[in-house]
Amino acid sequence: MINSGDTAWVLASAALVMLMTPGLAFFYGGMVRSRSVLNMLMMNFMCLAVVSVLWVLYGYSEAFGTSANSLNLFGDLEHAGMASVIGNTITSAPGHTIPMFAYVMFQLMFAVITPALISGAIADRARFWGWTVFVALWVTIVYFPVAHWVFAFDGYANAVTGGPAAGGWIANTLKAEDFAGGTAVHINAGAAALALCLVLGRRRGWPRSSSRPHNVPFILLGASLLWFGWYGFNAGSALSATDTAGLAFTNTTAATAIAVIAWLIVEQVRDGKPTTFGAASGAVAGLVAITPACAYVNTMGALVVGLFAGALCAMAVGLKFRFGFDDSLDVVGVHLVGGIIGTLLIGFFGTSSTGTTGAADGLFYGGGASQLWRQAVAAGSVLVYSFVIALILGFLINKTIGFRVSEEEESAGIDEAEHAETGYDFTGLFAGGGALEQAIGHPPQQAAPPAGAPTGQEG
């Protein structure tokens, strides 16, 4: 029987996660130059369009269909075009059953935001259609299979044959723990971001000259929307309105809050000032790190995860200068590093006392190193696979239809070159010698020329 309360919670959580993509667009959009803001917003917004279409055509089936091979690498096409979804259910525990369509929409929003995260690494220099093609190929070859590895548990969904669906190898064979996407979302996106940084190369003048964020309020607004939506991301992954959802909600709050403080302390010590930009970045770092661990650690463990994430990610964003890769908006330093931190710390601070299904004791709770090595294998496997495929796809796109704008277009701003529009129109404030004064009811006064100045009427 369908549990209406759980169904309502999952649908509401799906809507919260959907809001994260526009939130990410504002977060990234505030960081770039004013002449590139529309391109960044469009790169994120386009993920909603492209991934949604692919998801209903074949993506959901590739991610959550019964494993099509003995290695459990991807699902078959039993649900392609949403076939056999109506009337089918997902069961997280006895008495907690939701319609498969609710689960389809919930997981879609994860699939949408994952490639959107990558866009920040190549800001100010990517062609819109090159990016769009990359998103379509990358989610098909990388995200959908990796989601199968991590999220497709045996028996969650009924296959067309009526038997339990066979899931992915990380969830069921390796038994690594990832409650809401530290590997499938953040390590996956961070590794691909690093690959595209190498393919597209550095921005013009970087690192000697770096553009400053054009709209810091946008950054904080975007981070706040991400934090709000992340409750659906983490607590919604319980797939039911239970203690597990409450634990994930609480741990998400605690880890994020302390990560903000940790990042600002690092800034104060290193740079002498705590910044708004740093507070927003610290919040996102904490959200990233607690994502895989939110239902596998207790709240004290969540504080430790957030503390490590805020401090280490604040230091990790400087790695791009040391190693020479131009990660425009610190996707590698926040999402790749933060995802690894959260995934590995489960092996230290995970505890079965949370009551979450499948939770194992980590090293500090008497479980030895067993869970730690499982976490390391999961993180490393996703990182390498995503990096290699993204590197190949980026290279092929750049050599065929083109992935990087020209130096002239980059210098002038890619909004005009790629979209024939600009984010802001200031000409009305200055054209005509007084549009601003006219707008407030004070027509401009024509100043008399200085004595002896030419009037244009001599002769």
Image (spheres, rainbow, N blue to C red):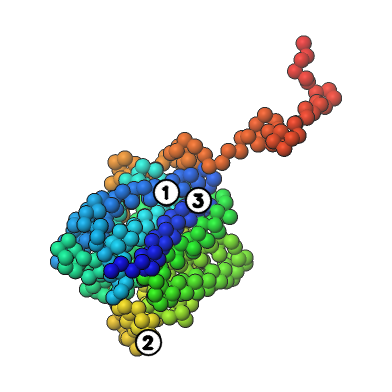
Question: Could you classify mark 3 by the number of other residues whose Cα lies within 10 Å: few (under 14), some (14-19), or many (20 or more)?
Answer: many
Residue type, mark 3 in image: Gly
Question: x, y percentage for residue 365?
Answer: 37, 87
Q: Are marks 2 and 1 in contact (CB under 8 Å)?
A: no
The single residue placed furthest to the right in the displayed view is 451
Residue beneath the point at 45% across and 56% down: 19
Query: In whole angstroms, how far apart are the C-alphas of marks 2 and 3?
Result: 42 Å
Q: In the rendered image, which quarter is residue 62 located in?
A: bottom left
Residue 3: x %, y % from top left: 33, 69
Left or right: where does residue 223 sit relative to residue 353? right
Q: Which residue is mark 1?
A: 45
Alpha-carbon span between mark 2 and mark 1: 43 Å
Q: Secondary structure at mark 2?
A: helix
Q: Label 1 sits on what residue type?
A: Phe
**Residue 203 x, y percent position in the rendering:** 45, 48
Mark on residue 29? 3
The answer to whether any part of residue 252 appears in the image is yes
Earlier residue among tags 2 and 3: 3
For marks 2 and 1 on the same chain, the one whose residue lies earlier in the sequence: 1
- Tell me if label 3 and label 1 are in contact, CB under 8 Å: no
Q: Mark 2 or mark 1: which is in front?
A: 1
Q: Which residue is mark 2?
A: 365
